[in-house]
Amino acid sequence: MQKLFDEYDIEINPEHTVTAITMYGVTEDAWGYIEQDDNDPAFFSVYRIENGLQVCVGDFSEREDAQTFAQRLCDKYGVGMQYGAGVREVKC
């Protein structure tokens, strides 16, 4: 297991509301931009959805580590996991 960066899930501002957690496989393009790539990812990023915006809260080299962290955040915030356009009703 190699965690690429420290987990940086910091406390949210009181006026923000976390509505879901999501996770993507990602790669870096030729210009250094990060883009979603679930087919052949270089690493995995976990995001909080708060006030309609995605906030990256962790990058991981292994899918399983990202999933474990996403589960911890689902439990922490009492929300489900977002997949595509919807949010699962049950916790991730």
Image (cartoon, rainbow, N blue to C red):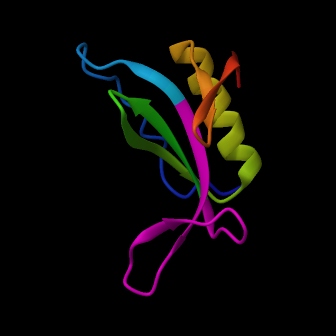
Q: Residue 22's spot in the image, x, y percent? A: 57, 39
Task: Residue 25: give x, y in percent of width and height.
Answer: 63, 59
Q: Residue at left 55%, top 32%?
A: 21
Q: Is residue 83 left or right of residue 53?
A: right
Find out whether residue 42 is within the magenta segment.
yes
In the image, 84 versus 62, the foreground residue is 84
Q: Quadrant of residue 42?
A: bottom right
x and y percent of residue 43 in the render?
62, 63
Vertical arrangement, residue 37 with respect to residue 76, above or below: below
Say which residue appears at 32% left-offset and 23% top-offset: 12
Residue 36, how many percent across, how many down? 55, 63
In the picture, measured across the screen, residue 33 lies left or right of residue 37, that is left
Q: Is 84 above or below relative to 40?
A: above
**Quadrant assignment for the C terminus:** top right
Q: Residue at x 70, y 35 (%)?
A: 68
Which span of residues is magenta-colored?
A: 21-43
- Which quadrant is home to the N terminus? bottom right
